[in-house]
Image (cartoon, grey):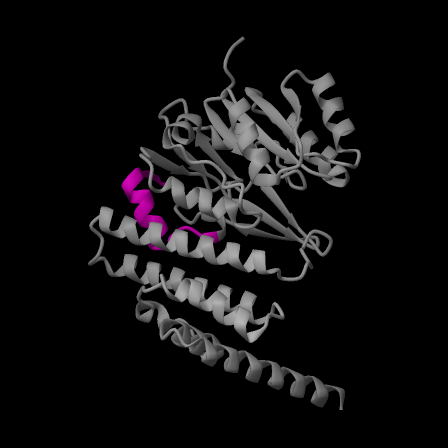
């Protein structure tokens, strides 16, 4: 039996509502040299029946069941089953256009690439917007790609996401990088950032947007912020920051102003994201202090090169974070909340 060009890994967990459309869009691809690896992560709804139906009617679809372990665990399981030259990931509540794989593999007859990055359609409550790589169908060497990431020339959502990409299977296997099963959030961001440490040969950008990422009121998480979620976010933020900082040295880019500005912007975003999780999670003052100190102690990176992009309370939060003054951050949030309440009362009046 010949080796497929692409192995498509679909983690499945209680997604019966969307699964038929997702798998149907894969079956309808104009590019046919693929295998679809459906990893049922312990679903308790009708997802298994949908998957088994596709497996029975199309030899390219393969169904696997495992005990529930989360999306990272399901992706790792799928990677172990994959036989294709390239690996793609599709979330079970999304779908792809008919020419998705055809467009992503279009240049593979001419040259082999470590990663092929496509665009994406964001569909939020029925409204569609395009998210493109912004690299004008460029072909970059591994080092050029890493510099482009550091300079934030690639939209952060596209870089962090594992969908709308093809990964050379050898790249993943040789790097030893896998999805960290400890985390249930941002594990894809950590996966892609850790891959930057590996021997990436070349990267191709395809400006077509054939991946349809669905985001609506029913799929947006409304769960409360847990201490575990905050700690996971802090750990991922500090790890990715350290990797980026190390890359700057490895690429001898310490004097590249665009690289330093991009790195500083990443640090600012981490500060703002962590502060939001901590201050809106209903934690005690002691708990908040412990969270802040857990990353203040290791985050000692410059923010000045990107500070001019921020104003108002965001700028104040970044400045307070850089000074490791968590009490100032709490005061800023308290004042922001008080102003919001006043505005709401005035509006009612």
Q: Pinpoint residue 139: horizontal percent, then vertical percent.
A: 34, 37
**On the rendered structure, is 206 left or right of 225?**
left
**On the rendered structure, is 276 left or right of 155?**
right
Give the quadrant of residue 336: bottom right
Q: Residue at x 47, y 58 (%)?
A: 234
Q: Residue at x 36, y 49 (%)?
A: 149
Count of numbered circles in the view = 0
Return the residue found at the far front.
286
Q: Pinpoint residue 122: horizontal percent, then vertical percent.
A: 60, 50
Task: From the viewer's side, name the closer residue of 112 and 150.
Answer: 150
Task: From the viewer's side, name the closer residue of 63 and 349.
Answer: 63
Give the quadrant of residue 140: top left
Q: Pinpoint residue 249: horizontal percent, then vertical percent.
A: 23, 51
Give the quadrant of residue 324: bottom left
Task: From the viewer's side, name the closer residue of 31 and 269.
Answer: 269
Quadrant of the drawing holding the N terminus: top right
In magenta segment, residue 154: yes
Quadrant of the drawing holding the C terminus: bottom right
Magenta range is 136-156
């Amino acid at each position: 039996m010949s080796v497929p060009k692409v192995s498509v890994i679909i983690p499945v967990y209680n997604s019966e509502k969307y699964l038929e459309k997702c798998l149907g869009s894969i079956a309808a691809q104009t590019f046919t040299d693929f295998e679809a690896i459906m990893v049922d992560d312990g679903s308790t709804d009708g997802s298994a029946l949908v998957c088994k139906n596709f497996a029975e009617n199309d030899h390219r679809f393969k169904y696997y069941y495992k005990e529930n372990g989360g999306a990272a665990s399901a992706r790792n399981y799928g990677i172990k089953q994959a036989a294709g030259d390239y690996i793609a990931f599709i979330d079970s509540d999304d779908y792809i256009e008919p020419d998705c794989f055809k467009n992503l593999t279009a240049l593979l007859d001419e040259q082999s690439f470590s990663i092929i990055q496509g665009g994406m359609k964001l569909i939020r409550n029925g409204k569609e917007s395009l998210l493109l790589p912004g690299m004008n169908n460029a072909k970059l060497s591994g080092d050029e790609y890493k510099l482009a990431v550091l300079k934030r020339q690639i939209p952060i959502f596209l870089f962090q996401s594992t969908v709308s990409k093809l990964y050379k299977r050898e790249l993943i296997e040789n790097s030893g990088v896998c999805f960290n099963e400890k985390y249930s959030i941002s594990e894809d961001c950590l996966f892609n950032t850790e891959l930057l440490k590996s021997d990436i040969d070349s990267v191709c950008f395809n400006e077509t947007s054939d991946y349809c990422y669905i985001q609506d009121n029913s799929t947006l998480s409304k769960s409360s912020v847990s201490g575990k979620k905050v700690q996971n976010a802090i750990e991922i933020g500090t790890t990715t920051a350290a990797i980026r900082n190390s890359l700057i040295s490895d690429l001898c880019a310490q004097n590249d102003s665009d690289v330093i500005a991009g790195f500083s912007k990443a640090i600012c975003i981490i500060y703002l994201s962590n502060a939001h999780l901590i201050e809106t999670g209903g934690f005690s003052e002691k708990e908040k202090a412990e969270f802040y100190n857990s990353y203040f102690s290791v985050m000692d990176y410059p923010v000045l090169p990107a500070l001019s992009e921020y104003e108002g309370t965001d700028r104040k939060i970044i400045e307070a974070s850089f000074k490791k003054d968590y009490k100032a951050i709490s005061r800023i949030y308290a004042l922001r909340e008080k102003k919001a309440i006043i505005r709401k009362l005035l509006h009612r009046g």
